[in-house]
Every structure is written in structure tokens, then in C-alpha cells.
């Protein structure tokens, strides 16, 4: 359909491409009539068009000229009725299709009043801009809830990414987004080892794939299990790419008209990427096709969402967790919140890695996960120090991501306080920083780590700071004063 081509294939950056050209040039479309009065449409390609059509080059709308038959037939008079760019041609096709009921179009036809690119954009904004603005507000609100653990990864994938889990993960783990993971502090202490079976959902599958692809880490100690629904979704994405060649898309709101252009090799790279994930599954996982328990469990399981796609994955994972020594590895809070029955079978990615692959618990891995925009993972002094020093030196860093991870509610309390105090002592011991800069950095840290704490916790924190800074001379009073200022700012004390 032309409208699909318009939104998937057209290039929108040059607004002049929507205007009617003054003269016909190679690459343009022309509509012309002959003696019979019928309209004909042709594209003026450099190769493959007749000598008669080449005479249209340089001509304008309304120009007429005589064309001679090549071998026999009547002499014809050709009149140019319209000249169009590719973009304008597609827009005209959209209108034609919209008015054709035989095509089953669900789009209302619209005749643009303007022939200029700027005028057509304004018309599009007046037609669909309000709905586009409402949609963008809804997306922004959903993302805010996701960042605050009010919506799960699977729910945001359904509402924003049209059930495309892989795209959802890739977008949410890149700037400017955050990817809240399932904090280990939420979970029960579970005993498991390499002899157990570990189920991967999309959030853990993409995590382990990237660790092997980007950091060359191998995961051969354990047996991974995936649902066939996971594999089918990836294969469907590849099939969709085979049928389409996405080059561009549009965001239209009441106040903006923003074109997004895909790279020329997007289709090839995306297909290769998805195929690599399938290969990783083939090499590292067993696909469990025989889930006989599914029908019975579907009738009895209480879940918070009835969406078909989410329900299908939840049922597959629930059925597998029913089996002895099967555990679900996930960064998606949906399973933890919606299936309390299986909380003793749910482990976080971080919990699994620390137990089964402790040798991978390195500074490089921690910094990689910060780069992937993870929020809710454990942090330590070495990570804070490395990111902070890179920030001071002007190198690329994820120190702001470290601050986001300073969340008392998502951390083990003793470790949380201990690592922050070690970091504060490091900052105050740096001779290269002025006292004003040390206080500013300390204030930023306190502003983050004191959020959502009660008075008892803050008192414990304060006492620990006093105990650790009592040998730091002049900095003792400075850090305590900074703590009280941050506390007062946050809690209006």
C-alpha cells in the first residue's frame, strides 16, 4: 500500500521534495496525455525510457509536443499534465488508495490544499497532530512509570514497542533511557547450582547475548531453556524485515514534524543482528516445545495482565517453573509482581551471575552494565571511583548512572552505606579538588542516597559518617554539615 511505503520508505528531510517541480528532470514522475485523452504515468529514468519520453526533460506542466511512432502508427501529441518527485508521487498514491473502497483502506482520504512542503506539513499537523501529541504524552508517562518500577519491561514493550521485545530492550538500554532491572534485594534467598535448569526470558536472553558478543564472556556451565514463543517472535521480526525495507518514519504532533531516517544498511544489519541472537539460542539453549502443563495452568493461574502475547510467555514460563529445579532468570519485574506463587523460582540476572559466574564480577562488567543504562544493580566503591575520575578528566563516563543507582530501597543496607562512605572519603582525600567542589559532589551524593529513607536510616548513616571521618581533620565538620543541608533540602527539616 502506498501509505505503508510513505511511512516506511520515503525520505523526508528535504521539505522541497514535496513541492511540484517547475520542470521535468531525471528521477521525476510525469503524468501525460496522448490523443485518446487518457492519463499515463511514467518515471523519467536515465536508462530504459523511450526517446520520446526523453523529450520531456526540461519541459513544464502544460507543455505539448509531437512524438513520432518508432515503426508505424499515428502521430501522437503528448501533453504534460503533472510533474512529481518520488515523495509527492507517494502522497498522491495515498489519496488515490484512500478513496478506493476495493482496497479496504481504513484511512480517510484527504486532498492536500497546499502544494508546498511547508504547507503540506502544516496540514498534516492540523489533521493528526493532536492525536500525535496525545500519543507522545502517553508514551512519556509510561516511560516515567517504567523508570520508577511502576510498569514492567513486558508492559512497556506491549504499550510502546508493539510487542517487539528485542527492539524494546535495544532502545531502553541506549541514551536517553534507563533500564530498571530486577533488584536482588527484592528476591528470596534461593539455593541453585550448575546442575539446575535456567529459563531465559527476553530480558535475560538479550543480556547474556550482549555479554558474549560485546565482552566475549561464555556461558557454558549451565543449561538454559527458552520458550518457543521467544524464538517465534524473533523469526517473525526477521520475516517482517524481508517483506519491508524501512528507510524512514515520521513523528507528527501539534507542535512538531520530525523525520527519522534509517541508515541505508539498516535492513541488512538488523536481520544479521536478529539472526545472531537465534544462533546464540541454538548454541546455548534448549527450546522446550513440550509444555504439556500449559492448558491446565492457563485455567488456574491468576495473572494481572490478560494480553495475549504477555499471557503466552507468562504461561510458558510458569509451566516450566512448575517443574523441579527449574528457575527463571529475569530482569523483568512483571513475573515477580504478577506470579507470587513462583517467587521462590525467580532469580535476577545479577543473582545468577554472582553465584554461577563469580569470575565475571569485574569492574569491566559493572561499567559495561552502566553503559547499557541499567538501574537497580548493585554498585561498589571501585565503580564509583572509576566513573568519577573519568568525569573529572572529561572522558566518556556513566557517573550520572552511578548516582541513579544510589537508591537505598533497591540496595542491601549495610553494603549501601559502607560503599558510599568509602567513596566520600576518597573524594575528600583528593588534593586536586577545592573544598567547595568536594562539598558540591558530596551534596549530590547525599541528595540521591537519602531519598526514600526514614529518620532511623538517616541517623544510622550519619553516625557511620562520624565514625569514619573522625580522623579526617577539617573535613569532618564539612561532610557532616553537607549531610544536614542535603537532609534539610529533601525533607524540609
Image (tube, grey):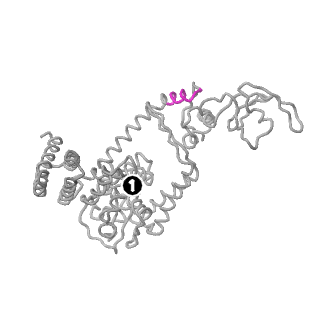
Q: Which residue is mark 1?
A: 311
Q: Position of residue 298 (x, y in %)?
A: 37, 58
Few, some or many residues within 10 Å of mark 1 (<14, 14–19, 20+): some
At 22% from the left edge and 54% from the top edge, which residue is drawn? 430
* Count of numbered labels shown in the rendering: 1
Q: Position of residue 380 (x, y in %)?
A: 25, 59
| Residue 411: in magenta span | no
Q: Is residue 115 shown left or right of residue 34?
A: left
Secondary structure mostly taken by the magenta-highlighted segment of the chain:
helix
Q: Is residue 451 visible?
A: no
User: Closest to the observer: 481 or 368?
Assistant: 481
Q: For residue 471, what is the image quadrant?
A: bottom left
Q: Position of residue 306 (x, y in %)?
A: 37, 50
| Residue 117: in magenta span | yes
At 55% from the left edge and 43% from the top edge, which residue is drawn? 8
Q: Residue furthest right?
A: 72
Q: Residue furthest front?
A: 431
Q: Residue furthest bottom?
A: 195
Q: For residue 253, what is the image quadrant?
A: top left
Q: Is residue 216 visible?
A: yes
User: Closest to the observer: 55 or 434?
Assistant: 434
At 56% from the left edge and 30% from the top edge, which residue is drawn? 117
Q: Position of residue 173 (x, y in %)?
A: 39, 52
User: Closest to the observer: 92 or 385?
Assistant: 385
Q: Quadrant of the C terminus?
A: top left
Q: For residue 114, what is the image quadrant?
A: top right
**Residues rendered magenta in the picture:** 115-124
Q: Of helix, strand and loop, which one carries label 1?
A: helix
From what the image shows, is residue 128 above or below residue 176? above
Amino acid at each position: 500500500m502506498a501509505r505503508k511505503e510513505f511511512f516506511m520508505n520515503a525520505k523526508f528531510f528535504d521539505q522541497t521534495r514535496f513541492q511540484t517541480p517547475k520542470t521535468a528532470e531525471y528521477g521525476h514522475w510525469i503524468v501525460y496525455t496522448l490523443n485518446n485523452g487518457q492519463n499515463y504515468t511514467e518515471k523519467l529514468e536515465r536508462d530504459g525510457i523511450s526517446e520520446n519520453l526523453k523529450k520531456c526533460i526540461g519541459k513544464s506542466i502544460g507543455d505539448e509536443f509531437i512524438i513520432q511512432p518508432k515503426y508505424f502508427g499515428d502521430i501522437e501529441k503528448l501533453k504534460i499534465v503533472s510533474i512529481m518527485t518520488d515523495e509527492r508521487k507517494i502522497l498522491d498514491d495515498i489519496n488515490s488508495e484512500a478513496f478506493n473502497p476495493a482496497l479496504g483502506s481504513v484511512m480517510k482520504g484527504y486532498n492536500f490544499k497546499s502544494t508546498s512542503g511547508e504547507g503540506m506539513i502544516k496540514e498534516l499537523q492540523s489533521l493528526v497532530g493532536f492525536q500525535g501529541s496525545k500519543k507522545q504524552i502517553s508514551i512519556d508517562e509510561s516511560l516515567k512509570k517504567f523508570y520508577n518500577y511502576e510498569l514492567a519491561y513486558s508492559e512497556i514493550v506491549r504499550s510502546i514497542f508493539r510487542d517487539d521485545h528485542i527492539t524494546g530492550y535495544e532502545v531502553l538500554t541506549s541514551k536517553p533511557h534507563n533500564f530498571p532491572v530486577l533488584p536482588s534485594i527484592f528476591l528470596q534467598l534461593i539455593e541453585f547450582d550448575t546442575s539446575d535448569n535456567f529459563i531465559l526470558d527476553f530480558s535475560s536472553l538479550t543480556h547474556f547475548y550482549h555479554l558474549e558478543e560485546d565482552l566475549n564472556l561464555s556461558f557454558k556451565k549451565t543449561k538454559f531453556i527458552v520458550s518457543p514463543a521467544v524464538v517465534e517472535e524473533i523469526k517473525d521480526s526477521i520475516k517482517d524485515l524481508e517483506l519491508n525495507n524501512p528507510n524512514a518514519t515520521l513523528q507528527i504532533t501539534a507542535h512538531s514534524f520530525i523525520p527519522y531516517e534509517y541508515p541505508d544498511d539498516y535492513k541488512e544489519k538488523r536481520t544479521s543482528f536478529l539472526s545472531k541472537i537465534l544462533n546464540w539460542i541454538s548454541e546455548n539453549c534448549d527450546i522446550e516445545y513440550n509444555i504439556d502443563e500449559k492448558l491446565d495452568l492457563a485455567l488456574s493461574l491468576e495473572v494481572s495482565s490478560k494480553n495475549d502475547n504477555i499471557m503466552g510467555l507468562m504461561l510458558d514460563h510458569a509451566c516450566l517453573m512448575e517443574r523441579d529445579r527449574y528457575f527463571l532468570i529475569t530482569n523483568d519485574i512483571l513475573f515477580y509482581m504478577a506470579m507470587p506463587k513462583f517467587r521462590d523460582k525467580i532469580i535476577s540476572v545479577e543473582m545468577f551471575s554472582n553465584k554461577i559466574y563469580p569470575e565475571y564480577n569485574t569492574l569491566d562488567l559493572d561499567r559495561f552494565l552502566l553503559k547499557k543504562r541499567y538501574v537497580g544493580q548493585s554498585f561498589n566503591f571501585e565503580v564509583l571511583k572509576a566513573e568519577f575520575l573519568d568525569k573529572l578528566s572529561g572522558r566518556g563516563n556513566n557517573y550520572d548512572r552511578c548516582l541513579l543507582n544510589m537508591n537505598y530501597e533497591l540496595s542491601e543496607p549495610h553494603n549501601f552505606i559502607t560503599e558510599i562512605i568509602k567513596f566520600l572519603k576518597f573524594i575528600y582525600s583528593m588534593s586536586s579538588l577545592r573544598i567547595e567542589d568536594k562539598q558540591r559532589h558530596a551534596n549530590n551524593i547525599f541528595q540521591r542516597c537519602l531519598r526514600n529513607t526514614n529518620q532511623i536510616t538517616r541517623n544510622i548513616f550519619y553516625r557511620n559518617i562520624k565514625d569514619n571521618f573522625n580522623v579526617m581533620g577539617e573535613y569532618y565538620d564539612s561532610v557532616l554539615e553537607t549531610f544536614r543541608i542535603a537532609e534539610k533540602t529533601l525533607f524540609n527539616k
